[in-house]
Amino acid sequence: MSQRAKSESTDPDGNAAASAEASVEKSAGPAADSTENVSFEELVRRLEEAVRKLEGGELPLDESLAVFEEGVRLARAGTSRLDEVERRVELLLAGEGAPRTRPLHDG
């Protein structure tokens, strides 16, 4: 991490905010980009965690941006999974005749 980034992640007493640095590095690392082998439920859990962190308002700007970026990746991956499931359901229903959709709740 650069000297500038390290100096920005210190508290008013000059103590390093190690947990914030580690969290940013973890969020921005290559593992953060991989959502292929993660269950949909885990995507949702991680997205909810990102939302809680951002709503808390306690993160430094750089870490907030990293968490926000991770949240966008997670949301897009979840949307993609839901779209794929919808396509699969429509294909299954097509086997019974023309594909049809209807609301989950009548009324």
Image: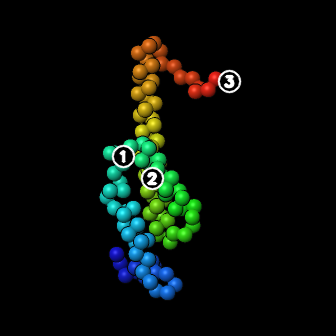
Q: Amino acid at mark 3?
A: Gly
Q: Alpha-carbon distance for marks 3 and 1?
A: 36 Å
The image quarter containing residue 87 is: top left
Q: Amino acid at mark 1?
A: Val
Helix, strand or loop at mark 1: loop
Q: In terms of depth relative to the viewer, which is nearer, 86 or 14?
A: 14
- Callout 1–callout 2 Cβ contact below 8 Å: yes
**Would you call the spot at circle 2 few (<14 residues within 10 Å), some (14-19), or many (20 or more)?**
some
The residue most toward the top is: 97
Q: Quadrant of the N terminus?
A: bottom left
Q: Quadrant of the C terminus?
A: top right
Please say whether residue 72 is visible from this viewpoint. Answer: no
Label 1, on which residue? Answer: 38
Q: Amino acid at mark 2?
A: Arg
Which residue is drawn at the image coordinates 46% and 61% (left, top)?
Answer: 67
Left or right relative to 37: residue 95: right
